[in-house]
Image (cartoon, rainbow, N blue to C red):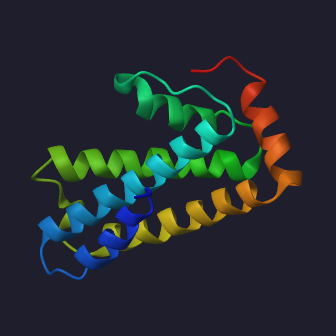
Amino acid sequence: MNGRAFLAVAGEVIRGTSAAHWRTAVGRAYYALFLEGREALLRWGFPPATRDRSHRFVRLCFVLASDPDLKDIGRTLEWLGQRRNDADYTLLSPLFASIGVARRALRDAHAALAKLDAIDADPARRAPAIADIGSRPLP
């Protein structure tokens, strides 16, 4: 299995008609991007963070980069992570009274994964991206 399989599940769940469906879709969109980002970092030679620091590690590796696409992936992870927390822990949140946040979550996760795929598939983009992340102390 790969992380993006969760995005396919999010696409199925979002068709539901309740806040529970839309909250679940947001969580799966976050995990799709988080897991794919983590796997890319591993492929690129960055050691995995300990389990309890993994989310922070992946997010900061991307958001602290100077490359605009890496930074955008990091910002998307931040936004999705905040919405996932709202979905999972703030039951009275008005964010999930409609499908809007869930739609944005899926759209943004797809866009961030496309950027990650483009970087990973192109050696001329991948090498500077790896150097960019590696140029600062790991979080």
Locate residue 66, reporting x and y percent.
76, 38
- The residue lying at 81 percent from left, 59 percent from top is 122
Horizontally, residue 108 falls left or right of residue 26, namely right
Name the spot of residue 124 as percent of width and height, x first: 89, 53
The N terminus is located in which quarter?
bottom left
- Is the residue 67 above or below the residue 46 in the image? below
Work out which residue is located at the far top of the displayed protein and give it: 137
Name the residue located 10 percent from the left edge and 51 percent from the top edge: 91
Where residue 120 sits in the image (x, y, percent)? 72, 54
Residue 76 visible somewhere in the drawing: yes
> Residue 24 appears at what percent x and percent y?
22, 62
Q: Is residue 69 left or right of residue 77?
A: right
Q: Is residue 63 at least partly visible in the picture?
A: no
Seen at 35% across and 45% down, the residue is 82
When the figure is inspected, residue 133 is found, relative to residue 38, above or below; the finding is: above
| In the depicted structure, whether residue 5 falls above or below residue 45 | below
Q: Quadrant of the C terminus?
A: top right
